[in-house]
Image: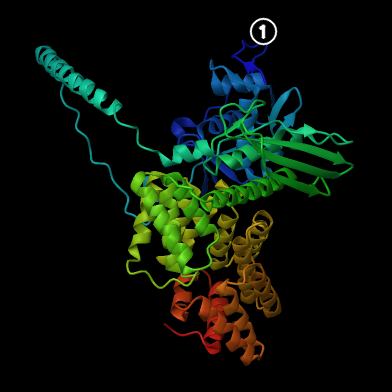
Amino acid sequence: MHAAPSHPRPQGHSPPEAAPDGAGGADVLRFSDFEFDPAREQLRRGGALVPLSPKPTALLRYFLRNPGRLISKQELMESIWGDVVVTDDSLVQCVGELRSRLGAQGAELITTHPRRGYMFEALVVRAAPARQGAAAAAAALGQPAMTPAPSRVPAPAPATAQRRRWQYLAAFLAAWLLVLAGAGVYIRSRPAPLRLDEEYANRYSIAVLPFQDIGSTPSPERIREDLPNEIAAQLSNLNMRVIRSAQPEGVRHAMTGTLATSGTRLVIDLQVRSIPQGQVIWTERLDFPDVTEAGVGLDAAQQAVGSLRVRYRDLHRERMNSPGFRPDAVDLMVAGWGDLDLRQSVEDVARARARLEAALRVDPDSVGALTGLGAALMSERFGYSGEPLPADPGESERVAERAIILAPENNIALINWANVQLFRNRPDLALQFFERAALNQPANANARVRYAAALMYMGRLDDAQAQCEAALKIGKRSPRVSASAWGMLSNLAFVRGDDDTAYAMAQRAVAQRPTYGLAYANLAAVDIVQGRPEEARSHMAEHLRLMPTSSASRQLTNNPAGSEIYRAGRDRLIAAMREAGLPEN
């Protein structure tokens, strides 16, 4: 790694004149299935917002001004960072993050030319923007648009009056400076409040070091250079502090990796060590038979990040259960999330809620604790772990609303707010928020499952199945996520009328998680349809043992129909459950 200050352009080098972004922001730029609005600095795909941080946004803007042109690293760093001294790694990480947000097309749209630079290989077309102003945004949230009141411009005051006002203002500010100086002494004498999200980011901070290529065949440049950046970008989405560096300074963990390519086969070995102890806390081997297949890098990053997240959770549970361990508020927040990840019963959800509420009493503005509490409250409303209907259903909506206001692009806040839309019988609106969450954090298997559910409600069965399959690959180490994905595939098969597959998928869900109550209800429904009443009653009895508050009306509330295709399949499923013994209310 070396510093790359702002260099003067070589004489004779002059990049083409940048195309204007549109008169007064009137035009948007379209490429592939994306649309970029320069005036709002927003990237959208299929109408859904794709979140981008400032530097990748600036990089995309520069690429869109210069499509089809090989741009040197030096030129890109000058255009994005100006006179600020940065390293080559900063640009590489920025490119990796932008590629990640562009999904599976990222590596094809932004190609790497070794030792020369990057090229944006897409046709860029100007177009009039869709209506996405304040009124459209308010309508998407189900809120009235706000019309700004006309403002009055005061007449300029005479010069003498102006001077007198400035004198009064100066005296007022001087008095307040004395007050603030005294308050500063008092404040500095008090301990700083614990900021849970900052402390969490530091405790799980990690450096992703350059990976080593040790194979008999050189690994493709797009894998060797881009995979560490993709992993770093996805780890950042977990609210961890992540750096890309050859030296793991100032962080708690370091990730190293090797790439071994032989012919078309690629084997990736990864490990994470604690710093300064040097203890290996996680290892993973990923094996791909065809390194030339599209999406290998993204697939590898998703599997790696999903596996590491599970390992962090398990290590924390070991600490929490060790004799004499006294958790602080951050530990309670992490433990509460762990309870939700592994929940099997009402008691698990109640314990998660209590821990997250205790963390919020220390830091009421912690987005991590707030979204966790929102997830616990949503679990109570769905009743998947056997919870009764909450006494105050509106509490989950109030918590979800506060989280989405504090962190409008946080993935869990998006998922919780999408669930609010489901309970308001708006699966079409919920779909938009689930999609944003899935695009924002592709390695979140649970986000994929929830997105699949919304796609199913809207009748997009093939898209829903693809999301379930991705969730199974990413979340293979999580029995709860795997069971949910198999259960969703069972529902999809039943909606399609493929009852045998629906039965087999429900059996796989039970094999992954024997306490997954919804799968037993699906088994009972297929038993009824295929003429096995005794087996149906047995499976329904197990469903009601695990979910004693389940009912046909609750199934309807939890699964709103946004399309006739899904409505017909859902109604057939619930009718069969009723016949197997599911109570109405």
Task: Give coordinates of residue 347: x percent, y percent.
Answer: 46, 66
Q: Nearer the viewer, residue 94 or 380?
A: 380
**Residue sitting at x 67%, y 78%:** 503
Q: Position of residue 499 (x, y in %)?
A: 67, 79
Say left or right for 422 vs 92: left
Q: Quadrant of residue 2?
A: top right
Residue to which mark 1 is pinned: 11
Q: How many marks?
A: 1
Query: Nearest the camera: 205 or 84?
Result: 205
300 on left or right of 338 = right
x 68%, y 9%: residue: 12
* Amino acid marked by disc 1: Gln
- Point out the image quarter for the C terminus: bottom left
Can residue 14 be seen from the camera position used here?
yes
Around disc 1, counting alpha carbons within 10 Å, would you say few (fewer than 14), some (14 to 19), or many (20 or more)?
Answer: few
Q: Quadrant of residue 34?
A: top right
Q: Residue 101: horizontal and vertical position, in percent?
A: 59, 42
Instruction: Indicate whether 348 appears above or below 91.
Output: below
Against 76, residue 461 (above or below) is below
- What element does badge 1 sit on? loop
The quadrant where residue 507 appears? bottom right
- Look at the picture and state if 194 lies above or below 514: above
The spot of residue 434 in percent (x, y) is: 52, 56
Which one is in front, 154 or 454? 454
